[in-house]
Amino acid sequence: MKYLLITALVAAALLCIGYLLVLLAQRVMHRRWTRQVRFLLAAMLGVLGFLCSVAAYLGAYYHAGQEARHALEGTADVRVTAIEQGYLFDGPGERTAVVFLPGAKVASEAYAPLMLRIASGGSDCVLVDPPAHFSLMAGGALDRTFASHQYDHWILAGHSLGGIVASSYATSHPGLVDGLVLLASYPTKQVEGRIKALSIYGSEDAVLDLPAFEKARELLPTNAKVLRMLGANHAHFGDYGAQDGDGIATIGQREQWDETAEAVIGLAREIEME
């Protein structure tokens, strides 16, 4: 809803600016257009401005760091392969897979270190690479992922906006996933009670909307695990540098990845034991 409101406000502002430009052009050119022509020209300018704004917004994103690029090379235990939907981290596990959605405007590759750790622990990972680095447009990639791979259990996960999209997808596809992992994120709809949910956020996270996060706890299953990771911040779930407005972590990136992976692996084992 927030993104729709922002989009509507931007569109309205650009339409007004377009109309003012048309009036200015009319005066400079000593022309007098009808009201319908003025509105049409203003709408055309508004649409053009809106498209340029969207392109500029989506074109600026956080890039993956060196350690993330190195993680994409895989290890002796985990083979990393580029697939249509993003990347497959194929480790020693065979029963469970984690499907992961990145945060908004963050290169999917930035989460490779975390995926590598989870895959090494026994759960394969599909790191989704959404169009324009925007997980809101990842629905098709998720559909193809679940249709093209066979696992006994699926865990849908995401960071920040990716977690919101993951929870929404899980609620709109009942019975599809057995687990839900939210990193610095929260659901916007009631999550199935049968789903085992894990929510992790950092004590130094200054990006996460804490009031919305606390309010959304009631949308999680009653047996959901909520982990407040001491010293962790928002950006260090991935490897993409400092994020605007974030707090300063007091633990290292690797420690944050290790603790997060350990919790996700524990959730996968719990699901497999049932």
Image: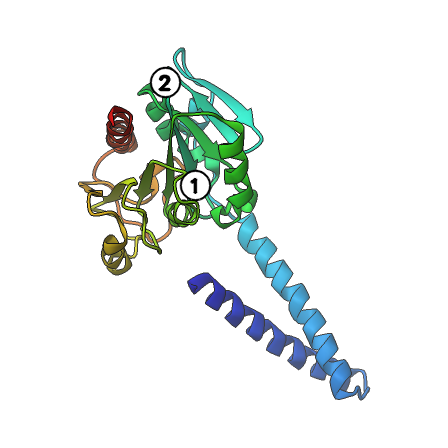
| Mark 1 residue element | loop
Where in the figure is residue 266, as x and y percent of width and height? Answer: 24, 28
Q: Nearer the viewer, residue 159 or 63?
A: 159
Mark 2 lies on a secondary structure that is: loop
Q: Mark 2 points at which residue?
A: 93
The quarter of the picture where residue 148 lies is top right
Q: Residue 219, relative to residue 264: is it above or below?
A: below
Towards the viewer: 145 or 47: 145
Residue 173 picture quarter:
top left
Mark 2 and mark 1: Cα distance apart in space? 22 Å
Q: Mark 1 points at which residue?
A: 102
User: Where in the figure is residue 234, as x and y percent of width and height?
Assistant: 31, 45
Image quarter (top left, top right, bottom left or bottom right) of the C terminus = top left
Q: Viewed as shown, does residue 163 lie left or right of 22? A: left
Taking 249 as reference, is 147 above or below it? Answer: above
Of the two numbered discs 2 and 1 in the rendering, the one whose residue sits closer to the viewer: 2
Q: Mark 2 Cα within 10 Å, few/some/many (few <14, many 20+)?
A: some
The amino acid at mark 1 is Pro
* Residue 64 visible in the picture: no
The residue lying at 56 percent from left, 49 percent from top is: 59
Res 26 quadrant in image: bottom right
Q: In which quarter of the image is the N terminus?
A: bottom left
